[in-house]
Amino acid sequence: MNYTYQYPHPAVTTDIVIFSVRDNKLQVLLIKRGQEPFKGSWALPGGFVRIDESVDECAKRELQEEAGLEDVYLEQLYTFGAIDRDPRERVISVAYYTLTPSAHLTPAAGTDADEVQWFSVENLPELAFDHTEVLRVARDRLAAKMEYSTIGLQFMAEEFTLSQLQTVYEQATGKTLDKRNFRKWILSLDLIAETGKRFAAGAHRPAMLYRIKEPDRVEIIR
């Protein structure tokens, strides 16, 4: 039987923060909105939860529809529920975040976006809705996780140098790390191995390339 609720219902959306390290900078994927409100403004991928889907399903669908991305691991970040966060109606958003090598992604604007682009987190355009706050919370969570976990390895390509890995940790945490201590720590975990190949950049001495020994042992975001 049908039931009429006494109280009005807020709408529910999802927003997705995708981090990657590109050109030695921590970057985030944004879409240019193709419709009002905030048409033409940059925003995080996301959208309204349908009545017949879960919030997890919505996040994955919106990521595909707006950024052309599939099979991306997403972790729930936080629920944002400020009363005036959306000019259309009362909207509560469940935010997600992830980190991945950009080489694994081929973003493309979908049906609900005019453009999709990577931006440095240090040089962002003005964002729609409360997405500046969503992104701040996601970056704080990422930095905190990087302080005590190995999730930085998720950013890496199949082969990488220790300097490249250290850059990832420095970009994600916003801190300069001691080279010797960082290398001692990461090698002590026994998660990476030398490939026998070296990487030459400029006039510097070629650096040893490493690989992840057992990808399943690398901690995912949670």
Image (cartoon, helix red, strand yellow):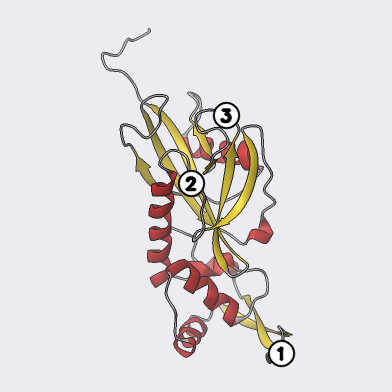
Who's the residue at 26% across and 13% down the image? 6
Label 2 near label 3: C-beta < 8 Å? no
Q: CA distance from mark 3 to mark 2?
A: 16 Å
Who's the residue at 43% across and 38% down the image? 129
Residue 54 seen from this side: yes
Check disc 2 and give the amino acid type: Glu
Residue mark closest to the camera, 1 vs 2: 2
Q: CA distance from mark 1 to mark 3?
A: 49 Å
Residue mark closest to the camera, 3 vs 2: 2
* Image position of 55 (left or right of 106): left
Q: Nearer the viewer, residue 86 or 6?
A: 86
Q: Which mark is residue 126?
A: 2
In the displayed structure, 52 sits above or below 187; it is above
In the displayed structure, 4 sits above or below 73; it is above
Label 3 sits on a secondary structure element that is: loop
Work out which residue is located at the far bottom of the displayed protein and give it.
Answer: 205
Is the residue marked by circle 1 packed among few (<14), some (14-19), or many (20+) residues within 10 Å?
few
Check disc 1 and give the amino acid type: Ala
Residue 196 % position (x, y): 72, 86
Looking at the rendering, in which quadrant would you find the N terminus? top left
- Give the residue number, with chain letter if any, for mark 3: 35
Who's the residue at 44% across and 51% down the image? 135
Q: Specify which label sits upstream in the sequence, 3 or 2.
A: 3
Work out which residue is located at the far top of the displayed protein and give it.
Answer: 1
When asked about the image quadrant of residue 23, the answer is bottom right
Q: Specify which label sits upstream in the sequence, 1 or 2.
A: 2
Label 2 sits on a secondary structure element that is: loop
Check disc 3 and give the amino acid type: Gln
Residue 15 % position (x, y): 48, 41
Label 2 near label 1: C-beta < 8 Å? no
Label 1 sits on a secondary structure element that is: loop
When asked about the image quadrant of residue 178, the answer is bottom left
